[in-house]
Amino acid sequence: MNVKIKINGLSKQFKVKDKNVIAFQNINLSINEGEFWCFVGPSGCGKTTLLRVLADLEVPSSGSLEIMHNDINKPLNSMIFQEHALFPWMTVWDNIAYGLKNRNVPKNEIKEVVNDFITKTGLNDFTKAYPHQLSGGMRQRVSIAMAFANDPEILFMDEPFASLDEQNRIILQQELLQIWESNKKTVVFITHSIDEAIYLSDKIMLMTSQPGKIKSIYSVDVPRPRNMTEMRKSAYFNELFTKIWLELKDEVKRY
């Protein structure tokens, strides 16, 4: 597999009231094209800051970051946040079409792509609705459709399901995997949920408490497509969950 993201000795520090605060330190990591990674770790360990550096929203203090851009006619990445980032004055259909229109994609192609992702995310009855008319789960569906429709090479996702209730979270996890399995984008996904990380990802990176470093990397050796109910019944799932939790608990106590 081709390396998509290569990180060498990456660190980030901020100045807070004349004091240097190290968010994360000496991150060395290679992410292959088409892999689904989840980052987990204690609150304040620098997960979100690291994601923002990868997405070119923050500048690292030291180290190097190399991201391969295969098709300059398509966006390198899209970011999905915990709270939706939709345009409130646009309908669901126009929000999803926004990135494509910005890239001057032909109208017939925009229509085809947008309608496809509307169907995939179950938004057929809401195409003319505005964000304020939707539930939190529906708004995140639009965010996911908007990101995938624009056809980026990488998707960065910062706890996109954290504010949802359990039922909506499980449904959106399933929908995300169904869409991802159809195009195998490179995904880097932050979560506090070990269950979610195991269910979604190929690899899990566990970070230490602040300053965040890599503590462990786990491979999730479960074939796809996956079923959360069946996975939770397996000894492998429970063994991996326990292993990650025990390591994470040590870091939470240390923070």
Image (tube, rainbow, N blue to C red):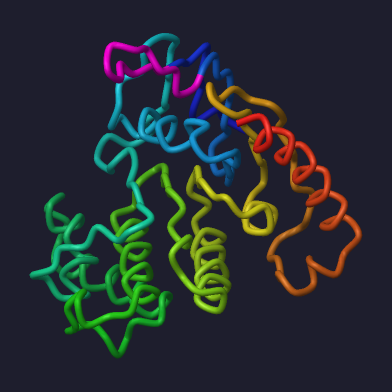
Q: Would residue 177 appear left or right of 52 to someone viewing this image? A: right
Q: Would residue 150 appear left or right of 211 to someone viewing this image? A: left
Which residue is depicted at the point 33% across and 37% down? 71
Residue 133, image x, y percentages = 21, 82
Which residue is depicted at the point 79% across and 67% down? 232
Residue 252, image x, y percentages = 65, 38
Residue 114, image quadrant: bottom left
- Residue nearest the viewer, comparing 69 with 161: 161
Question: Residue 14 lies in magenta, yes or no?
Answer: yes
Q: Main secondary structure of the magenta part?
A: strand
The residue segment tinted magenta is 12-24
Query: Which corner quadrant holds the C terminus?
Result: top right
Residue 110, image quadrant: bottom left
Which residue is farthest front? 17
Question: Residue 122 lies in magenta, yes or no?
Answer: no
Which residue is farthest left? 89
Q: Would residue 167 appear left or right of 66 to someone viewing this image? A: right
